[in-house]
Amino acid sequence: MRKLATAALGYSGAVYAAQYVIPRQWQPYAAAVLGVLALISLFLKGNLRLRALLITVSAAFGLVWSWGHYQLVIAPAEELAGREMTVTAKVLDYTVHGQGSDYIFVRLMGDDVPGVKTAIYSFDSSLPELSPGDIITAHVKMASAVSRYGDETNMYTSRGIFALAYLKGDVEVTGRWGLSFLYFPKQIAQAVKKRSELCFPADVSPLMKALLTGDTAKLSKDRRLYTAMGTTGIMHAVAISGTNVAYIVGFVRRLTGRRRRTAAICIPLIIIYIFMSGGSPSVVRAGFMQILLLIAPLLRRENDNLTSMSAVLALLLMINPSSAASVGLQLSFAAMAGVLVITPRIYKPLWSLSEKTKLANTRIGFLIRRCVINSFSSTIGAIAFSTPLVAVHFSYVSLYGVLANMLCLWAMSLCFVLGYLICLTGMAWTGLAAILGWTIAWLLRYVIVLVKFIAGLPFAAVYTSNPFVAWWLVLVYIIFAVSYTLKGKKAFRPALPVCLTAMALCGTIFCSMVFLDTGKGMFTAIDVGQGQCIAVFSKTGTVIVDCGGKGTTRNAGDSAAEYLLGQGRGSIDLLVLTHFHDDHAGGVEALFSRLDIKRLALSIDMSDEDELRDKTLELARASGTEILYVTENLEVAVGGINLRLFAPLGSADSNERGIIVMASIGEFDTLITGDVNATVERKLLSFANLPDIELLIVGHHGSRYSTSQELLDATTPESAIISVGYNNYGHPTTQVLHRLDDAGIDIYRTDLMGNISIKLD
């Protein structure tokens, strides 16, 4: 069995190398080198020769298959990008109604197009309700699945989506696939989604739907809860992961109590559940490993978890080598590796220690000990290897994840099993199911309250935007590795490394307070893509001007919140919104969900209908935020930061009616003009006595219609920051760049440099 593991790991390692290390054009040559090494390994002797052959041959195959998969599958789909055409396709799932767009997953059909999985998007809600197995025709414009916002991405290909299409007309259903009955798992999942909305109270049905089916669309609308679940490390429970498969097997095992019956019931249930969940990597991993675990005793074979895990990983990467970049796959296998390697080393000494307690001789004590120790050791094992990946992909480390998992997962496992039973009851008797749903809802409310409470505790998470946190995390793993290595033949004693880790964390917090001290103050342009978010810090004050952006997969509010939290700022004294466009205010909801905002300054023209404005005001009122309407020029002082807020001077579109901000710390002046044009800039100069400034936040992301020569001559800035990202407008324009350069102004750009900070000593 370990020979299979060796070959599988060799193949998987090569696929990951092809994904992250070896350029595509060099992959065939690298495979050839491995082929030569395979020939050389023939001269080795014994077991070493066999293992060398397995590794080199399987790795060569991994490189060849990664290269070939791109040439055979992805490249033909990329050739369609930019074409407007009528396509025929088979629908793979139900229509999804998202925020701002509807979409459907299909597989293209026809001799003139590659038969790849494609996502069709509609931005005007014209996508009808479609079902798996429908055959449709649609007029679309094809787009690339490997390029997003001007950069290469694996966001779609890692999920098996190799083409994108944007709807340009109506969709016509022309028939049904002859084998549509094979989509019955999708039909079951859709029925469960609908029943969960009917059987459970409205305040918990989004969480229950996410727990049962992985559909987080409605759950994500509760930004505070959604963020708290990520911060506390229990999002995996509602993301359709291996945890859900464990719930199924555990429930059936308790019902049957017999190995053969458990296997007979669980194996088909697991297979159906894999298809219900859309075949996410984490579920496939857990499902196949559970199936192998159930089958092994029946075949009188000992199950080898390492072989099972490596074989499943290789299988997934053979189906789609691009799935190597899937965050879910990486986290799932890392967590499982931790459970296999770390959990037993924690469980055994804790169990031995618990046998010396008074609970050891009672049945209830036995159950309590097993539940607590198993939960603790499994959680530690799962996070041991997955935490670095979470830090890389999501830029934070949850400090209370173990506590949250121990307190919440037992309730969520009950809700998962009982939720399915209640939905099944609801198909026959809705009234009874609603009563049962109301009862179970209290368990979900317990989870919601607890998660929000833990997420609100000090240092619930630390953020790697703070470099000291990143180094602390590296130090933690060094401490445990050294401690384990030096233990020799003695039992590993975690007390010392745990204490050293805690001391290092305290040192990290202290160093952050000292070295991240803003001095007199600091101005930072946070990289939010094509948008603007300016943070102004003093020792005791925090001001944010705008929070929005486009052209990035991150929400601007999340980016801003994580940057502020990384700087040790848990609240905002004043948020100023120059105007209500997505690239300046689109991240406000996320910002409100993560930080306490004390005051909000904005300009209101009630003659306009503006959904974003109304939503912002609703959030502010719900949060108890003081609202400051800038209908005339105002001067506001915030902890050593002096602000001049100039009331709107224009009368045309929202850009021209924006607030202009002068932020000063001591003698350092910064002018933030938002998106106003040169006409409004000249109006400002005509009545406002502006000083010579040190920093200019370039207007309208570098549009040629802003940052006029008159403004530069009047204010003589020393430095200029252009907050800009991928866009189709040509920002920043050559005209603006030339004007700044001719004036001898130092130019900084967030699209080239990321976050840009100017610190005042």
Image (cartoon, grey):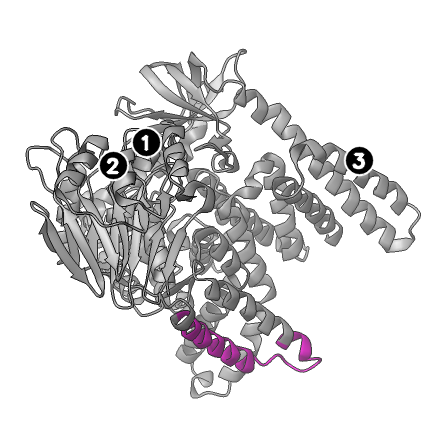
- Is residue 426 depicted above or below 236 in this figure? above
* Mark 3 or 2: the one toward you: 2
Mark earlier in primary sequence (3, 2): 3
Q: Position of residue 314 (x, y in %)?
A: 64, 43
Residue receiving disc 2: 675
Q: Position of residue 643 (x, y in %)?
A: 19, 55
Mark earlier in primary sequence (2, 1): 2
Which residue type carries mark 3?
Ala
Q: In which quarter of the image is residue 551?
A: top left
Residue drawn 36% across the image and 45% down it = 720
- The question of residue 227 being in magenta is answered with no
Q: Give the range drawn in magenta.
A: 483-512
Disc 2 is placed on an element classified as: loop
Which residue type carries mark 2?
Asp
Q: Are marks 2 and 1 in contact (CB under 8 Å)?
A: yes
- Is residue 245 depicted above or below 377 in this figure? above
Q: In this view, does 690 lie to the left or right of 752?
A: left
Tag 1: Cα neighbours inside 10 Å, few (<14), some, or many (≥20)?
many
Residue drawn 55% across the image and 62% down it = 339
In 3D space, how far apart are the residues under numbered discs 2 and 1 (Cα atoms)?
A: 9 Å
Which residue type carries mark 1?
Ser
Residue receiving disc 1: 703
